[in-house]
Image (cartoon, rainbow, N blue to C red):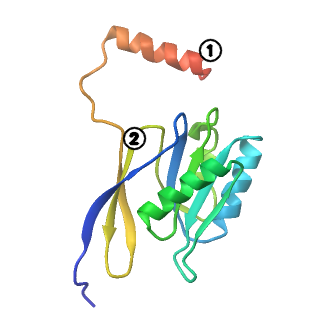
Amino acid sequence: MKGRCMDLDFVQLSIPVDCNIIVGQSHFIKSVEDIAEIMANSVPGARYGLAFNEASAPCLVRTEGTDPAFIAAAASCAKAVAAGHTFFLILGPGSYPINVLDRIKACPEVCHIFCATANPLQIIRARTEQGAGILGVIDGSSPIGVENDEDKKARVAMLRRFGYKF
């Protein structure tokens, strides 16, 4: 049966200051507990909030986490996007996607990661009579040029400051 219409729009997500977000798609409610377990095993003591949009009855936003403010922020993102089987993981200060991303990608329920970022984030969304889905993301701003020698030095210094390079 051919659909009648599809609306395209974008949703600006509100991410708490000094936090990162991972946005993905999963196929099963079990991912809520599995992603929470990944967080506990990968970054013990991490402050985070997780929200998952259930795509079948009762169609609730399911949440987990260790920080009530980050759980509320993740739930706010999930409600704003309103796309089934999507999850929003807010990582508090000191926790970074690089520490958990491979484990989340390896989670059996996770189908796709749309982004992992601390930048301003817009979700490109399609809506039909059935519901909504994420088509992609706009992560941060567009480039304004190519780095020069000073920019390269600053990039290397930042990586050293973060402890990713020796």
- Figure quadrant of residue 129: bottom left
User: Residue placed at 58% from the left, 21% from the top?
Assistant: 162
User: Residue placed at 59% from the left, 37% from the top?
Assistant: 96
Q: Where 35 sits versus 165, above or below?
A: below
Q: Which of 146 and 5 is in front in this view?
A: 5
Q: Quadrant of the N terminus?
A: bottom left
Does the image show residue 158? yes
Camera-side mark, 1 or 2: 2
Please state the horizontal and vertical placement of residue 69, each as a whole percent of the image.
62, 48
Q: Which of 81 and 41 is in front in this view?
A: 81
Please state the horizontal and vertical placement of residue 134, each as a whole percent of the image.
38, 62
User: Residue placed at 52% from the left, 36% from the top?
Assistant: 17
* Three-letter code, disc 2: Pro
Please state the horizontal and vertical placement of residue 146, each as a whole percent of the image.
27, 21
User: Could you tell whether 67 is left or right of 151 in the image?
Assistant: right
Q: Name the residue under label 2.
A: 120
Q: Mark 1 points at which residue?
A: 166
Instruction: In the rendered structure, find residue 41 and report the number of the disc placed on it.
Output: none
Q: Where 79 sits versus 1, above or below?
A: above
Does the image show residue 112? no
Q: Quadrant of the C terminus?
A: top right
Q: Earlier in the sequence, mark 1 or mark 2?
A: 2
Tag 2 secondary structure: loop
- Figure quadrant of residue 133: bottom left
* Three-letter code, disc 1: Phe
User: Residue placed at 37% from the left, 81% from the top?
Assistant: 130
